[in-house]
Image (cartoon, helix red, strand yellow):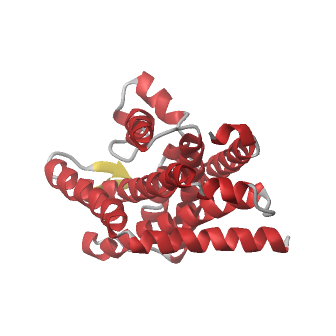
Amino acid sequence: MNRFLLATGTLVQRELARFFRQRNRLIGALLTPLLFWILLGAGLGGSYRVPLGGSSVSYFQYFLPGTMALVCLFTAIFSTMSVIEDRQAGFLQGVLVSPAPRSALVAGKMAGGMLLAFFQAALFMALLPFLHVSLSLSGFFVTVAMLLLMSFGLTGLGLIIAWKTDSVQGFHAVMNLFLMPLWFLSGAVFPASGAPPWLRWAMTINPMSYGVAALHRGFFPGGDGPSLALCFGVNLLFAVFTFWFSLTLVRRGGDIG
């Protein structure tokens, strides 16, 4: 257990140090979602209001939880992309042959990505007063808990994809093909109520939809949609699955290339 905790803590510390040394990652993970929020909010804000929480909210208000989910997704992408770089530099092979358990590698990468995603996404809560949204204490805890859980699961998903990808270019291709549609079909950009049946079905099986729904419930209590218990249950299962699948891949020494 001591070996596991030491290795995990070291990898988490390495992830944090690497992130703060690379300012472009901070700019990309924060400014890109912020620009999405500003441009889409300004462009669509005057077109319609979204029914949510027993009343209608502006598009700026509706889109903020989706923007926070996008921050989690971007940070997961950037943090797990380092797996490809570490493999090419030989660092990953060194970790795999060390006495540290391979579960520590998975836990360290996912915990590091989770912390980075959480702290960046949580910064967007500072916009709530400007949107005239009053966050209750229970809503605050719901938001914090879901951001942590969603960040952990998305980092695990990014780790799975990065582990099976040979190049950064290939990782970006998978991101554009798979991860970005995962966000678009999460209820972050538009509610499922106005979508055609086949699109609503795709949003229903998307685990990220339940994370965004929980954030909406935290900001705007009393709305329709999946319950908080269902939202947390789905995201917990998703986080456990991505950790288990990542660990399975890591334990196959031949897959490292």
Task: Classify residue 252 as left or right of residue 211.
Answer: right
Q: Considering the image in quadrants, where does the N terminus appear?
A: bottom right
Viewer-nearest residue: 55 or 170: 170
Residue 226 at x, y percent in the picture? 55, 46
Q: Is residue 127 above or below residue 109?
A: below
Q: Is residue 168 above or below residue 137?
A: above
Q: In the current view of this chain or complex, which residue is farthest to the top? A: 198
Viewer-nearest residue: 34 or 227: 34
Residue 149 at x, y percent in the picture? 60, 59
Query: What residue appears at the point 57 percent right and 50 percent down from the top-left corner?
Result: 87
Q: Is residue 9 visible?
A: yes
Q: Is residue 58 visible?
A: no
Viewer-nearest residue: 238 or 195: 238
Q: Quadrant of residue 175?
A: top left
Task: Classify residue 60 as left or right of residue 185.
Answer: left
Q: Considering the image in quadrants, where does the C terminus appear?
A: top right
Task: Classify residue 206 as left or right of residue 68.
Answer: right
Residue 140 at x, y percent in the picture? 51, 72
Query: What residue appears at the point 18 percent right and 48 percent down from the top-left corner?
Result: 44
Query: What residue appears at the point 46 percent right and 41 percent down from the top-left corner?
Result: 167
Q: How many marks?
A: 0
Q: In the current view of this chain or complex, which residue is farthest to the right? A: 1
Q: Quadrant of residue 2?
A: bottom right
Q: Is residue 103 above or below residue 6?
A: above
Residue 135 at x, y percent in the picture? 43, 73
